[in-house]
Image (cartoon, rainbow, N blue to C red):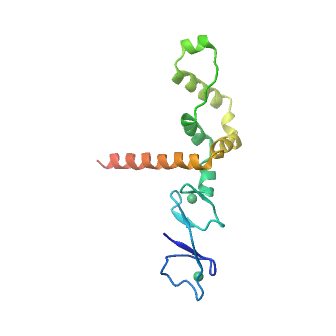
């Protein structure tokens, strides 16, 4: 745990003598950029800072996040009997890429950041998968 000094505006350890009149308040840690922040400088939601949340709220992550955030729609029953869910999803992704809808980063951002806590949870899961992959490479 690190602290922010309201007086000299430094991030310090509890026993660190940062200035002559330290006034320490708690900080929160961001798992992506590996830094501590004072809430009023930068908000940290569920272990991810608002800057990293914003940066990760892009189109590719929206597609991955959307695989978890599924929605139920009524589709043509005949098509549903012809094609698997996987094929329908893949076809729609191809359609979006073909029509260059991927350029609409603003919609991707809105989708990802609608529930920041939940999106942070998704990003944290991704980190764990990356770690596992690295471990397997070393074996
Ligand atoms: Zn200080
Ligand atoms: Zn961060």
Eyeballing the image, is 1 above or below 14?
Answer: above
Number of callouts in the render? 0
Q: Residue at x 53, y 48 (%)?
A: 121
Front-lying residue, 28 or 34: 28
Eyeballing the image, is 93 above or below 107?
Answer: above
- Whole-percent x, y for residue 39 in the image: 62, 65
Front-lying residue, 47 or 87: 47
Tell me where residue 26 sits by quadrant.
bottom right
Q: Residue at x 64, y 20 (%)?
A: 74
Tell me where residue 7 sits by quadrant.
bottom right
Eyeballing the image, is 21 above or below 82?
Answer: below
Q: Residue at x 64, y 26 (%)?
A: 95
**Is 83 on the left-hand or right-hand side of 104?**
left
- Whole-percent x, y for residue 12 in the image: 53, 76
Residue ranking furthest to the top: 78
- Whole-percent x, y for residue 137 in the image: 34, 47
Front-lying residue, 39 or 133: 39
Residue ranking furthest to the bottom: 20
Q: Residue at x 56, y 50 (%)?
A: 120
**Is 119 on the left-hand or right-hand side of 14?**
right
Front-lying residue, 39 or 90: 39
Tell me where residue 77 sits by quadrant.
top right
**Is 42 on the left-hand or right-hand side of 81?**
right
Q: Quadrant of ligand 1?
A: bottom right
- Whole-percent x, y for residue 53 in the image: 60, 52
**Is 80 on the left-hand or right-hand side of 129?**
right
């Amino acid at each position: 745990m690190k602290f922010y000094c309201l007086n000299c505006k430094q991030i310090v350890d509890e026993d660190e003598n940062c200035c002559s009149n330290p006034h320490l308040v708690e900080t929160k840690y961001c798992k992506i950029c590996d830094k501590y922040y004072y809430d009023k400088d930068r908000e940290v939601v569920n272990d991810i800072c608002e800057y990293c949340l914003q940066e990760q709220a892009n189109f590719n992550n929206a597609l991955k996040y959307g695989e978890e955030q599924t929605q139920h729609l009524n589709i043509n029953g005949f098509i549903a009997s012809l094609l698997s869910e996987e094929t329908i999803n893949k076809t729609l992704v191809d359609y979006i890429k073909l029509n260059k809808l991927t350029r609409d980063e603003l919609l991707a951002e809105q989708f990802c950041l609608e529930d920041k806590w939940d999106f942070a949870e998704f990003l944290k899961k991704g980190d764990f998968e990356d770690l596992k992959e690295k471990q397997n490479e070393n074996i």
